[in-house]
Amino acid sequence: MIRHVVHFTWSDAADEDRRAATVAALRRLPEQVPGSLAFTVAPDAGLVEGNAHTVLVADFPDAGAFRRYATDPVHLEVIAEHVRPYLAARSAVQYEV
């Protein structure tokens, strides 16, 4: 199994409404792009200063399923419309579970 973890830090252009809309768009991805076994998107709990603002954790049965998700046109559209314009920083890792 492959776990995909992404930390998003939003720019100043992403107010609370924009962040909520982006989280909602990301949370709809499992309904729109098949292949994930588990999928979580959540805002940071605000317990530690300096954390990223949002995390996405998704599990895929294998590397092929992850690659299909990563290159799916719907996924790419969500990134282009809801993520990239408001992104200050992003960090991601994929690893075997």
Image: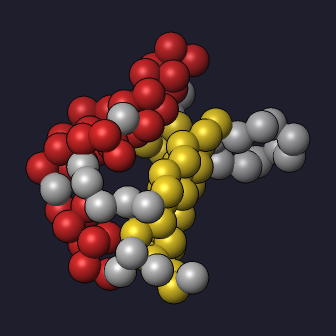
Q: How many marks?
A: 0
Question: In the drawing, does residue 14 fall left or right of residue 29?
Answer: right
Q: Please, which residue is most extreme toward the bottom here? A: 96
Question: Where residue 75 appears, x then y in whole percent?
Answer: 24, 48
Question: Where residue 29 appears, x then y in whole percent?
Answer: 33, 42
Question: In the drawing, does residue 26 fall left or right of residue 48?
Answer: left
Q: Residue at x 51, y 22 (%)?
A: 20
Residue 18 sits above or below residue 29 on the image: above
Q: Please, which residue is most extreme toward the top here? A: 17
Question: Where residue 5 appears, x then y in whole percent?
Answer: 53, 64
Let me know if residue 14 appears in the view.
no
Question: In the drawing, does residue 71 fall left or right of residue 63?
Answer: left
Let me know if residue 90 appears in the view.
yes
Q: Residue at x 27, y 72 (%)?
A: 65
**Res 27 → quadrant:** top left
Q: Residue at x 24, y 49 (%)?
A: 33
**31 and 93: which is toward the camera:** 31
Which quadrant of the rendered structure holds the C terminus?
Answer: bottom right
Residue 76 sits above or below residue 67 on the image: above
Q: Residue at x 87, y 41 (%)?
A: 47
Q: Please, which residue is most extreme toward the left here? A: 73
**Res 7 → quadrant:** bottom right
